Amino acid sequence: MRRRKGLDFNHKRRKKISTVVLKEIFSWLFWIGISAVTAVVLVYVFGLRTNVVGNSMEPHLYAGQKILINRLVYQISEPKFGDVIAFQPNGNENSHYYVKRVIGVPGDTLVIKNGRIFINDEELEEDESYDKIAEPGIAESELHLAEGEYFVLGDNRNFSEDSRSGNIGIVKDSYIIGKVWFKLSDKLEYMGIVK
């Protein structure tokens, strides 16, 4: 039988995947796998996963929420104002990790007057998500933070046991476990950097 000349719409061409494309795909899969394994190792070697206890950090973190703590960052730098840290009160290794926000750093002078925080004689300007502080605790009198000392507060100010409490007080750098850097939802649908 003679082949027809011209267009043939019934004829199907087979597409071949070139070996170059296959090598490129496998190369990408290999490096993605290596990156994922490296990330997991770094999180578990230099990090720590724990849960938030209590509602003292609402609305930013809630009770039972899983968080990742970076244990390496404070080996090479110091906690800064606004960092959310995990620590053991008075270095008590039998206690759960407390999670609070750094408000005062070494060299700062703090006092709480009329429900407001004053750092180095200047009022700390905060948005309306932070309540006016009902109980100043030990910060009713002026506190001066020495080297390696930090003043921390919960974001839910009137429902937080923090540096204002006599049994926690000033947090020394040796009590700090690390910086809270990721929060995870129970369903692991959302993962966000803690701010």
Image (spheres, grey):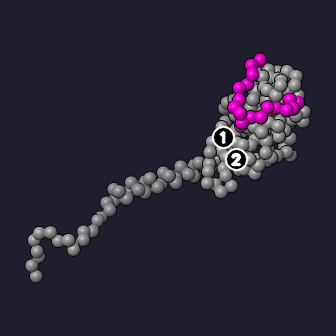
- Give coordinates of residue 18: x percent, y percent: 31, 60
Q: Is residue 125 magenta?
A: yes
Please name the residue that numbered disc 2 is placed on: 67
Picture residue at 75% right of the left edge, 41% below the top: 57
Please name the residue that numbered disc 1 is placed on: 194
- Looking at the picture, does residue 100 appear above or below residue 124? below
Picture residue at 83% right of the left edge, 24% below the top: 113
Tell me which label, 2 or 1, sits earlier in the chain: 2
Picture residue at 77% right of the left edge, 34% below the top: 131
Comparing labels 2 and 1, the label whose residue is closer to the camera: 1
Cα gap from disc 2 to disc 1, whole angstroms:
9 Å
The N terminus - image quarter = bottom left
- Give coordinates of residue 101: x percent, y percent: 74, 35
> Which stretch appears magenta?
120-137
Q: Residue 180, located in which quarter of the rendered image?
A: top right
Q: Is residue 78 visible?
A: no
**Dot 2 and dot 1 residues touching (CB under 8 Å):** yes
The C terminus - image quarter = top right
Disc 2 residue type (three-letter): Ile
